[in-house]
Image (cartoon, helix red, strand yellow):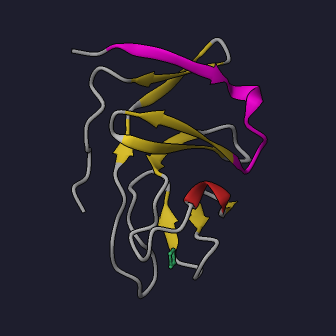
Amino acid sequence: MTCWTDIGALNDIPERGARVVKTHMGCIAIFRTIDDEVFAIDDSCPHKGGPLSEGIVHGKSVTCPLHNMVLRLDTGLAQGSDTGAVNTYPLRVEAGRIMLDTQGLRRERVA
Ligand code: FES
């Protein structure tokens, strides 16, 4: 069952920026790319828990602000020689509003 919940306007997130949403699954980072794509992943780096929402967004990836691990926003997978992953979460954009499936929040990827 899905329950799309409005978590804010797309324009509330700057391009290549992020905001954090607190849920029963923990803190989820919502990222906006330069192409206006939006992704939701855990806000905790699989290395040592760095705040990914404070990282640098480039393409469909984010670089952790602590030790520079690069993670894909669409798959949650670490890139390059790094290993590890974060969970990704379902969302969509409707009329400029970001909708997160809070009822069906699930771990789409188990690290
Ligand atoms: S905590 Fe993210 S790279 Fe170390």
Q: Is residue 42 above or below residue 20?
A: below
Q: Is residue 14 above or below residue 43?
A: above
Residue 60 at least partly seen: no
Q: Is residue 6 above or below residue 64?
A: above
Give residue 60's quadrant in the image.
Answer: bottom right
- Counting from the top left corner in percent of width and height, residue 100 is at 45, 25
Which of the pair 33/102 is nearer the observer?
Answer: 102
| Residue at 39% over, 69% down | 46
| Residue at 77% over, 27% down | 11
- Counting from the top left corner in percent of width and height, residue 95 is at 64, 11
- Counting from the top left corner in percent of width and height, residue 87 is at 34, 52
| Boundaries of the magenta span | 3-17
| Residue at 48% over, 66% down | 71
- Counting from the top left corner in percent of width and height, residue 69 is at 52, 77
In this picture, residue 86 sits left or right of residue 31: left
Quarter of the image with the C terminus in it: bottom left
In this picture, residue 98 sits left or right of residue 81: right
